[in-house]
Image (cartoon, helix red, strand yellow):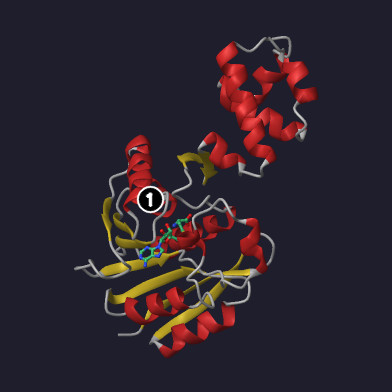
Amino acid sequence: MQKIKDLVINAKLPKKEVYYLLKHVLNLNEIQLMINEELELSEIEYKTFIKLCDLRRKKVPLNYLSQECEFYSRTFKVTQDTLIPRQETEHIIDAILEVSKSNPDLINILDLGTGSGIIAITLKLENKNFNITAIDKLENTLNIAKYNADKLDAQINFFVSDWFKNIKNKFDIIVSNPPYISINDSHLKDLTYEPLEALTDYGNGFFNIKHIIEKSNQYLNKNGWLFIEHGYNQGELVRNLFKENSYYHVSTIRDFAGIERISYGKINL
Ligand SMILES: C[S@@+](CC[C@H](N)C(=O)[O-])C[C@H]1O[C@@H](n2cnc3c(N)ncnc32)[C@H](O)[C@@H]1O
């Protein structure tokens, strides 16, 4: 059987990735791995590791191999039924928590296209007063969100809905990170393992955003807020749509790379 130190040398993958996979297979942290480099893997651990290395060489994302992803300092399960959460989505959490700090009566929140549930679950865990409803079009995706909510002990009202189709109530805040990549965007070809339904509207990338902005005002309480994540080149279009649909205090937040990423506004009804 092979020792950890030999696998790190022989895996034909970047060392960082080998450590990531070994941590997952052996259920050890990085320091434990480093101080146990003479440790031999059992036959089953070795076979699992080799299989994961093969998949990694075929460019399967590491998060799908470990079925885990960190978001807002918590670990969420992800599978190929869900998008792999992006770090920039953490800005949407910060923005909502900031608005709710000065408006503590905003408690009813709707998360549209919840995926692995990261937005809904994180908001609930950061503010226990929130009442959160989260929907997704896909049942399999929603099952992962439910698993994460159970594991992290967050009470969320989940159900399947094609955007607003099965929504009966009104909310103080609506939040969404919808599929917004244009089907012609060259970035899509690098994302072959993630569900297309989570990435694109199969059109110019603007269809879902437009639908959500135009419909949300029917589902927001007086003085409610809408927060939307969008593509690197959609900020101005999104702000204009907000204004055309009776929103004010319209603003955009840039992500860690300085790219316009999240726009929001308050309904003027
Ligand atoms: C970009 S992913 C976002 C997932 C998660 N909220 C996040 O931020 O990581 C978009 C999600 O919207 C869902 N979705 C796509 N079309 C939808 C529709 N018509 N109605 C409801 N959800 C939809 C997808 O299944 C996917 O989970």
Instruction: Name the outermost residue toward the bottom.
Output: 244
Q: Where is residue 48 in the image (x, y as percent from the top left)?
A: 58, 23
- Asked whether, in this view, residue 191 is left or right of residue 158, the answer is right
Q: Which residue is nearer to you in this view: 263 or 96?
A: 263
Ligand 1's quadrant: bottom left
Classify residue 248 by image quadrant. bottom left
- For the point 52% across and 46% down, the residue is 71
Q: Where is residue 65 in the image (x, y as percent from the top left)?
A: 56, 36
Q: Which residue is nearer to you in this view: 148 or 25?
A: 25
Residue wearing tag 1: 141
**Three-letter code for the amino acid on which mark 1 is drawn:** Thr
On screen, residue 159 above or below 183 = above
- For the point 58% across and 20% down, the residue is 26
Q: Which residue is nearer to you in this view: 191 or 260?
A: 191
Q: Mark 1: is the Cβ under 8 angstroms from ligand 1?
A: yes
Q: Position of residue 171 (x, y in %)?
A: 27, 68
Q: Position of residue 165 (x, y in %)?
A: 25, 70
Quadrant where the C terminus lies? bottom left
